Image (tube, rainbow, N blue to C red):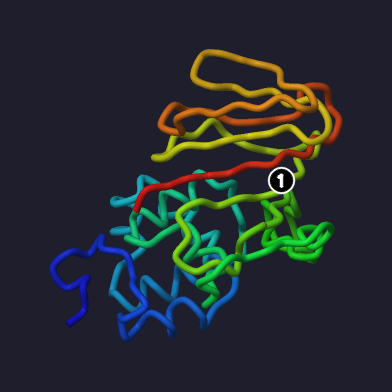
């Protein structure tokens, strides 16, 4: 019995007959979103209503390969009833997943903006290197995030919590009406339900360790 029959927001599970087809068949977040929508007959309009993400942005993500920052992806995953990791890169590793020094650089999962080679647009200056992409069933998403000075983000709320540790550079955290500057070695933990964003504090690149928790 499909666990989503009576609860369309229930997360996919490994014993769901559609799990491996939906999770493993596609790679980009847009392709995964489209595949999950197709499998469960969810229109873009319905997904927009459930997630609060505009339908035109969902269309850009699916059709153009546009990658927004994490907040819209988190909202879309909630609207589909799946974990954020489902849209990024789930795998079948159930035990510990080790990411050796330097490997995160080689396993960058996505950059915000349009794909390389797009006729117009291009990247907006955020790159996310996943540290636990091969861990199946995860509830936390750890990333090494590089924030370029031209990074284009909006202040967005979403369910969950975030922990940030500044590895290099100076970070400006806008959290609600407050602004805080974090320097190398500083860290912050906050509830994500308050509108927030992180950008460069001095027009120089910033590298952070970000751990995102989103409840299903």
From the viewer's perspective, tell me whether residue 19 is left or right of residue 213: left
Give the camera-side residue of 71 and 208: 208
- What kind of element bears circle 1? strand
For disc 1, the marked residue is 145
Most distant residue in the left direction? 6
Query: Which quadrant of the figure contains the N terminus?
Result: bottom left
Q: State the image coordinates of residue 101 (x, y, percent, origin top left).
A: 82, 57
Query: Image point 33% across, 55% down: which residue?
Result: 79
Would you place residue 60 above or below residue 207 in this image? Answer: below
Query: Image point 61% across, 58% down: which residue?
Result: 66
From the viewer's perspective, tell me whether residue 87 is left or right of residue 16: right
Q: State the image coordinates of residue 24 (x, y, percent, origin top left).
A: 51, 80
Q: State the image coordinates of residue 63 (x, y, percent, origin top left).
A: 55, 68
From the viewer's perspective, tell me whether residue 16 is left or right of residue 101: left
Would you place residue 107 above or below residue 123 in this image? Answer: below
Query: Image point 44% across, 65% down: which residue?
Result: 137
Give the camera-side residue of 204 and 58: 204
Most distant residue in the top direction? 178
Count residues near mark 1 (Cα–Cα under 10 Å), then give few for <14, some for 14-19, many for 20+. many
* Number of marks: 1
Classify residue 41 by image quadrant.
Answer: bottom left
Query: Image point 68% across, 52% down: which residue?
Result: 113
């Amino acid at each position: 019995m499909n666990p989503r029959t009576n609860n369309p927001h229930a997360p996919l599970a490994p014993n769901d007959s559609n799990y491996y087809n939906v999770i493993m068949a596609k790679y980009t977040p847009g392709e995964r979103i489209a595949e999950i929508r197709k499998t469960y007959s969810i229109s873009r309009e319905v997904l927009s209503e459930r997630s609060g993400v505009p339908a035109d942005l969902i269309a850009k993500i699916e059709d153009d390969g546009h990658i927004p920052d994490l907040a819209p992806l988190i909202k879309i995953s909630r609207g589909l009833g799946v974990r954020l990791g489902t849209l990024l890169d789930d795998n079948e590793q159930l035990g510990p997943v080790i990411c050796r020094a330097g490997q995160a650089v080689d396993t960058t999962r996505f950059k915000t903006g349009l794909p390389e080679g797009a006729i117009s647009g291009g990247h907006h200056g955020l790159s996310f290197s996943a540290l636990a992409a091969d861990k199946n069933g995860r509830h936390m998403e750890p990333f090494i995030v590089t924030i370029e000075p031209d990074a284009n983000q909006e202040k967005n709320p979403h369910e969950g919590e975030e922990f940030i540790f500044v590895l290099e550079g100076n970070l400006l955290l806008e959290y609600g009406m407050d602004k805080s500057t974090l320097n190398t070695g500083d860290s912050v933990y906050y509830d994500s339900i308050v509108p927030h964003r992180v950008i460069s504090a001095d027009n120089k690149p910033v590298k952070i360790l970000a751990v995102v928790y989103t409840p299903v």
